[in-house]
Image: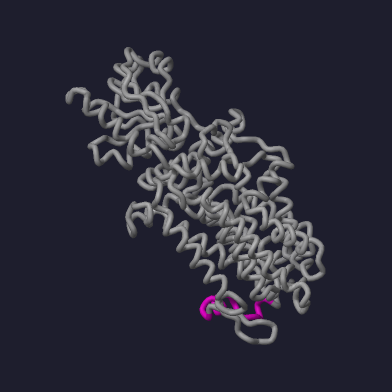
Amino acid sequence: MDDAISERVTGFANHSASMGRRDISGNRESLFSGGMAIAWALAAVALLVQMLTDGRYGYFRDELYFIATSNHLAWGYVDFAPLGAWVLRVNRMLFGESLHALRLLPALAQGAQIVLTGLIARELGGKRFAVFLSGVCVLVAPVVLVIGGRYSMNAFEPLFWMGCIYFLLLAINRNQPKLLVWSGVLLGLGLENKHSTAFFLFALVVGIAATSDRRLLKSKWLWIAVGIAFLICLPNLIWQYQHDFPTWVDLNNVRKTGKNTVLPPPRFLLQQIMMLNPASALVWIAGLGFLLFHRDGKRYRILGVTYLAFLAVMMALHAKDYYLAPIYPMLFAAGGVYWEGLNRGREGRRWVRVAIPALVVALGAIAAPLVIPILPIAKVVPYMEALGIKPPHTESHDTEALPQHFADEFGWPEMVASVADVYNAIPPEQRAKTGILAGNYGEAGAIDFFGSRYGLPKSISAHQNYYYWGPRNYTGESLILLQWDLDDAQRYCQSVDKGPTLDPQYGMDEEHYTILVCHGLKAPLGAAWPKLKHWN
């Protein structure tokens, strides 16, 4: 790929201004041509489904934490990159804090992911059926539905990764390496969104080096893209350095404690099939084969090698199965192209164009109540039992009957109300000195979010990024303890009183505990704070 050629072609600015491109015949292709109207229609369906269901249960544990972090904007956090908190701050300013407002952007991101999948399918040579099939696979994939229904950085990750892939394909297909600059921008933003983008970047480098696209290494535009990505993520790197790399410490603690469920390779691969919809395996596995071996797909072998490298890294690191979710749209796109080409002009195989999408949609519809709040919560477990399904566990302590993504949406308002009863029962002169010390960021976030309606002060916690926000002005003279073991409390406190016992019907097992009141911390809270630090 020659840099001199790229200087003579139309720049990306003109491409963006016209919102389209020209195919090899010179006809303009817009964001709605070549079957893209189908992708937009599927994206609208995804948005509608999420917005109709996303307010039925409650706030997810991590959402309460993200809201708290958006009140403490920084260039880094212990357990995630900063972009999600900054975006949420703007989102709250514009739309408020209701469940619908909080989950609007994730729902829009799922729709955008479908559109990007269609664009990638078109760049791989696909037309209407390829766009349709790949978009349907993204629309009904259980893991995509889960992620699209809650605010987190996971919702935006596919946009950065697949946006990078899309501009890479444009650069290859147009022989315009300058378009790689936009891949660099998206990778930089991706790194500021979630640190796992670094592993995707590593896999992409392997894909470049191991295929004929290694010629890109000679292009100045690739290195400009790398420089841009580095500059965008530099603020977080500086923050990590200034704080002695807390994210690395946190990840190392997770590994040492065995918090995450470790799956052997066969089970890990099986989980990939299940979380994406078993019927969709007909598409993404075919897409992988198309990229690696098919004569029409070998031009884009870089994508297949990138996936294999990323899969190998995630297996080696014993990552959670859903960490691979953002990379699958490009395989869905390639699979759509494969099935479209296989049946083009062959009347005897036209039934495949109906059978595969129908099977994908049917299994997706069956799985949907397991991942988005369609059913009344009391009917979820019976529905799972009728299907013979047990909830997937991504962490070793998960034992509740409900899947974690549902269980973590229950019990928070009730917990805060119980804490308020304890707090308001304390004599006024002591109450003014009483802090609420939460055991984890979920409880702390719930106190901060729901507590104002009861007149509760902001919580304190030594868990994750709450540790950096410190003990505020509390000395430890009086503390309400959430999720503390009685023996631990008695070791730290002069005396301990028992409060009400929490027993949320649908909450996580760890949220069943007795509220304790600590009278007189044996050491000043500021001095004890480093010993309470809990990163996992």
Residue 4 painted magenta: no
Coordinates of residue 27 in the picture (x, y in percent) = 63, 86
Q: Residue at x 24, y 41 (%)?
A: 453
From the viewer's side, name the closer residue of 255 and 198: 255
Q: Please tell me whether residue 269 is drawn above or below residue 433 in the rendered image.
A: below
Coordinates of residue 131 in the picture (x, y in percent) = 63, 70
Please say whether residue 208 is visible from this viewpoint: no
Magenta residues? 6-18
Residue projecting furthest to the front: 386
Q: Please tell me whether residue 306 is drawn above or below residue 14 in the rendered image.
A: above
Task: Determine the image quadrant of residue 362.
Answer: bottom right
From the viewer's side, name the closer residue of 521 and 510: 510
Q: Residue at x 70, y 59 (%)?
A: 284
Coordinates of residue 324 in the picture (x, y in percent) = 63, 50
Residue 17 painted magenta: yes
Specify the principal SS of the magenta part.
helix
Please say whether residue 24 is visible from this viewpoint: yes
Residue projecting furthest to the bottom: 26
From the viewer's side, name the closer residue of 388 and 66: 388
Q: Please tell me whether residue 196 is drawn above or below residue 17 in the rendered image.
A: above
Coordinates of residue 88 in the picture (x, y in percent) = 40, 53
3 with respect to 83 (left or right) = right
207 with respect to 362 (left or right) = right
